[in-house]
Image: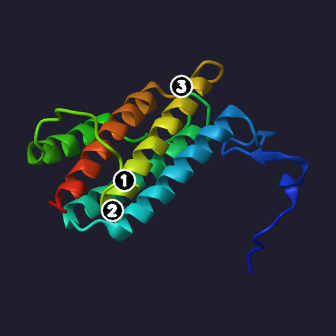
Amino acid sequence: MRRFRTGRGDDGTTGLRSGPRVPKDHPRVEALGALDELSAALGAAAAFCRRRDVRAALGEIQQDLRRAGARLADPRDDAPGGGPSAARVETLLDRFRPLLPPLRDFVVRGGPPGAALLHWACTVCRRAERRIVALARSSPVPPPLRGWINRLSTLLFALARLEDRRRR
């Protein structure tokens, strides 16, 4: 049986995928934590979204988040595996954007549960982006991750608006 605890983090450090141990408040760990929180927020949103196509998109995004976390957890330039693609996010945006009316005013975040949780996920995504940008000032971050996370917040905002339309 595999142990769920090791005790190695009791000293306030955690291990990265590439092996080094870093403080638990290291900028890389903060960025990874924000991605984890975003995945949890998307899981909660998916449980309440009424549109099947939105739920499917959220599942794809969660897989991208898993890939992004794996890529971010290994700061080596030669780390194996690619990260998520901004082009995939743009494809999803192109699919959903025509279903929305033009935005003419500020959006009050809320609405039915699925929309409200997507709005929350969008704000978590923007925090994750800030953490990734801050990390990039002092450590290697694959440039495609920055473009991907920036576009992702736009997609989540569009999905929240789409879910909110269902109540009208």
Mark 3 Cα-neighbour bin, 10 Å: few <14, some 14–19, many ≥20: some
What residue would you read off at disc 2? 114
Q: Say what amino acid the circle numbered 1 marks.
A: Leu
- Tell me which residue sits at (53%, 40%) in the image: 71
Give how far across and how far down residue 31 sits, in percent: 59, 38
Q: Say what amino acid the circle numbered 3 marks.
A: Val
Rounded to the nearest whole Å, what is the CA distance between mark 2 and mark 3?
28 Å
38 vs 150, left or right, is right
Relative vertical location of residue 156 with respect to residue 76 in this rendering, above or below: below
Relative vertical location of residue 15 with respect to residue 41 in this rendering, above or below: above
Task: Determine whether label 1 and label 2 are within 8 Å by CB.
Answer: yes
Q: Quadrant location of the N terminus? A: bottom right
What residue would you read off at disc 1? 118
Mark 2 Cα-neighbour bin, 10 Å: few <14, some 14–19, many ≥20: many
Rounded to the nearest whole Å, what is the CA distance between mark 3 and mark 1?
22 Å
Q: Is residue 75 visible?
A: yes
What residue would you read off at disc 3? 133
Q: Is residue 85 visible?
A: no
State the colouring used for the structure image: rainbow
Callout count: 3
Residue furthest out toward the bottom: 1
163 vs 70, left or right, is left
Give how far across and how far down residue 68 sits, in percent: 48, 43
The secondary element bearing badge 1 is classed as helix
Mark 1 Cα-neighbour bin, 10 Å: few <14, some 14–19, many ≥20: many
Rounded to the nearest whole Å, what is the CA distance between mark 1 and mark 2?
6 Å
